[in-house]
């Protein structure tokens, strides 16, 4: 019996978890000696591979020199190098880097930066516009700007009100753009926050880059800040280093986490424009940016992130990503006219399809049945209800992915609706 309360777990139904004793490449090795293919990159964090040698070495080296130090008082070279590297790779408008430790905190920081800017300018704005089906984290603030449902109904009384635009429907995209424009036109909107190209936890819902370009145009027109939450989409997942690149846009605020350290250690950053930073510059200490947490810019995590930047610069990461893209394309083409599946979709290294089941939603019984099915085959795949998706680390091999797709094929026969 363990004292651990696991995340997103109904312990009455799942009393115990296997222990993982080692990770390597695209695999997790459990206490019984079984090797499990990590087809979802351990909740989307592992980009290149588990324990990438260069990142692992950087962590070892960093531990020899530093542990945590107070970032409100001192800086350190790993943070400086990382900030420089991030500014180099992000779009030209982004000039400042604020550190935190998780995707949720990077989004909380983004919201506070936006409100802080308008507040300090003496033109307060507090309304946030969000997109239907979005997910930005599990803190009170990030739940407030995410989709409402069974995940957060107990906390609803504490959640703040936001304006929501509909997820773009193919052929009727203009409606989404019109909704955004109507909200922004009112003038009180501080920011529109969006997951670029792929809404992850909301069901791997995808929309084309030209809409992101339009979101940028509309928000800029009305002085609304555009916050790109690239916590999931960043670091190559969508086929480019950042998803925003595909739309040729620069957000006012950019949130990054997960793959920033290659997934090895927790770290997050929120990048912003000079306008936002400058609005907090003053002789008045009351106008500083009031945010911090104990582990801000942890030196070991920063060293891992600097090594990750080197991996991006020096290894053929994009060709590994292209290989995964090609494999997904091939497999999805095989399922194209298969009545057991609908909504086949792909964006870069992310492939998703909906199993025709007659039920959907996160709590649909299909999800746990699929998970058990995959688990029994040593595959880590966690469907979102009836949405099955693959988001592997970039080292994944052709045989590994084939195994995953063959299992999806088999699962559809056993668990999906009879064709
Ligand atoms: N934003 C997005 C788009 C995410 O997918 C997630 C996590 N899956 C978060 C924010 C929250 O990140 P974290 O779990 O690290 O707090």
Image (cartoon, helix red, strand yellow):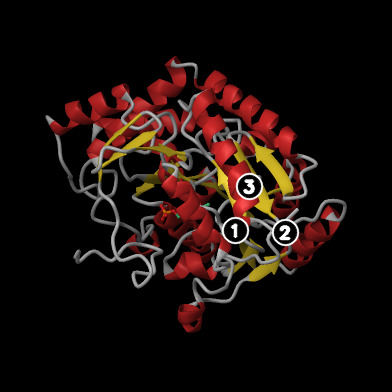
Marks 2 and 3 close (CB-CB < 8 Å): no
Please tell me in which quadrant of the rendered image residue 330 appears.
top right
Which of discs 2 and 1 lies nearer the camera? The answer is 1
What residue appears at the point 63 percent right and 47 percent down from the top-left corner?
A: 198
Locate residue 408 relative to residue 395 in the image: left or right: right
* Ligand 1 within 8 angstroms of badge 1 C-beta: no
Q: CA distance from mark 2 to mark 3?
A: 11 Å
- In this rendering, does residue 31 appear at all? yes
Q: Which residue is mark 3?
A: 198
Q: Which residue is mark 1?
A: 202
SS for tag 1? loop
**Is 219 placed above or below 190 here?**
above
Where is residue 414 shown, x and y percent of the image? 60, 53
What residue appears at the point 31 percent right and 30 percent down from the top-left corner?
A: 51
Q: Which residue is mark 2?
A: 167
SS for tag 3? strand
Q: CA distance from mark 2 to mark 1?
A: 11 Å
Where is residue 208 shown, x and y percent of the image? 74, 43
Q: Earlier in the sequence, mark 2 or mark 1?
A: 2
Tell me, for residue 30, which label it has, or none: none
Marks 1 and 3 close (CB-CB < 8 Å): no
- In this rendering, does residue 204 appear at all? no
Q: Residues within 10 Å of mark 2 (few under 14, many from 20)?
A: some
Q: Where, quadrant-wise, is the N terminus in this rendering?
A: bottom left
Q: Nearer the viewer, residue 120 or 372?
A: 372
Where is residue 304 shown, x and y percent of the image? 30, 32
* Ligand 1 within 8 angstroms of badge 3 C-beta: no
Q: Earlier in the sequence, mark 2 or mark 3?
A: 2
Where is residue 189 shown, x and y percent of the image? 65, 66
């Amino acid at each position: 019996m363990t004292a651990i309360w696991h995340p997103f777990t109904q312990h009455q139904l799942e009393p115990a978890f296997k222990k993982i004793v080692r990770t390597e490449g695209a695999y997790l090795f459990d206490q019984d000696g079984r090797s499990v293919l990590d087809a979802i990159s351990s909740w989307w964090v592992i980009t290149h591979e588990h324990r990438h040698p260069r990142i692992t070495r950087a962590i070892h080296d960093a531990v020899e020199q530093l542990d945590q130090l107070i970032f409100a008082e001192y800086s350190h070279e790993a943070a400086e190098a990382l900030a420089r590297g991030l500014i180099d790779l992000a779009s030209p408008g982004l000039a400042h880097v604020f550190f935190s430790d998780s995707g949720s905190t990077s989004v909380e920081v983004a919201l506070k930066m936006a409100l802080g800017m308008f507040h300090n300018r003496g033109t307060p704005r507090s309304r946030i516009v969000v997109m239907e089906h979005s997910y930005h984290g599990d803190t009170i603030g990030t739940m407030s700007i995410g989709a409402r449902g069974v995940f957060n109904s107990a906390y609803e009384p504490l959640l703040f009100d936001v304006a929501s635009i509909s997820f773009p429907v193919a052929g009727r995209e203009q409606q989404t753009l019109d909704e955004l424009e109507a909200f922004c036109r009112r003038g009180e909107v501080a920011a529109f926050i969006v997951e670029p190209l792929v809404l992850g936890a909301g069901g791997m819902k995808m929309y084309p880059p030209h809409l992101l370009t339009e979101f940028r145009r509309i928000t800029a027109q009305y002085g609304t800040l555009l916050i790109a939450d690239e916590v999931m989409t960043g670091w190559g997942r969508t086929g480019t280093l950042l998803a925003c690149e595909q739309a040729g846009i620069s957000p006012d605020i950019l949130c990054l986490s997960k793959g920033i350290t290659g997934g090895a250690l927790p770290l997050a950053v929120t990048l912003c424009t000079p306008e936002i930073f400058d609005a907090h510059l003053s002789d008045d200490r009351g106008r500083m940016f009031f945010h911090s947490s104990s582990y801000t810019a942890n030196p070991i995590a920063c060293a891992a992130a600097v090594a990750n930047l080197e991996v991006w610069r020096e290894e053929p990461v994009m060709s590994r990503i292209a290989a995964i893209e090609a494999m997904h394309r091939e497999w999805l083409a095989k399922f194209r006219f298969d009545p057991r599946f609908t909504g086949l979709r792909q964006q870069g290294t992310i492939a998703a399809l909906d199993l025709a089941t007659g039920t959907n939603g996160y709590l649909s019984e299909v999800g746990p049945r699929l998970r058990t099915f995959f688990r029994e085959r040593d595959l880590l795949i966690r469907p979102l209800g009836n949405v099955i998706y693959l988001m592997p680390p970039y080292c994944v091999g052709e045989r590994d992915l084939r195994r995953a797709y063959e299992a999806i094929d088999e699962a559809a026969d056993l668990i999906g609706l009879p064709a």
